Image (spheres, helix red, strand yellow):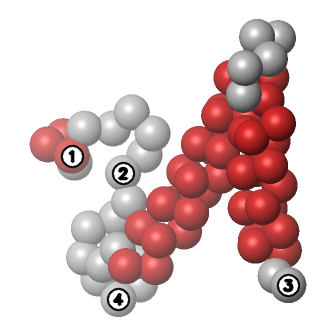
Amino acid sequence: MSTDTEKHRALLGALRDAQGKGDGSFEKAVTAAFEHVFEHLGRLNDHVSPGGPDGGDRHLQPGESPTLR
């Protein structure tokens, strides 16, 4: 099994285990899950973005407006 699949199962398990506890663990599990989703989105963006050595626009820097390039 891939490491990413294991990570997904662990994140889902943490969400299930934390539901209804009221001790902050659910919020931590949700935050971890979203951080992982954003990692995936970053990799996807890097994969499909036209920027880089092949031409096109470069990636935006954090907080940079696309209208101010």
Name the foreground residue: 13 vs 60: 13
Closer to the chain start, of discs 1 and 3, is: 3
Closer to the chain start, of discs 3 and 4, is: 3
Determine the residue positioned at 38% across, 60% down: 59
Alpha-carbon span between mark 2 and mark 1: 7 Å
Determine the residue positioned at 35% across, 74% down: 49
Q: Mark 2 points at which residue?
A: 60
Residue farthest to the bottom? 54
Residue 27 falls left or right of residue 41? right
Alpha-carbon span between mark 2 and mark 4: 16 Å
Other residues around mark 2 within 10 Å, as few (<14) / some (14–19) / many (≥20): few
* Residue type, mark 3 in image: Met
- Regarding mark 1 in the picture, which secondary structure is present there? helix
Q: Mark 1 points at which residue?
A: 66
* Residue type, mark 4 in image: Asp
The answer to whether residue 37 is above or below residue 22 is: below
State which quadrant residue 9 falls in.
bottom right
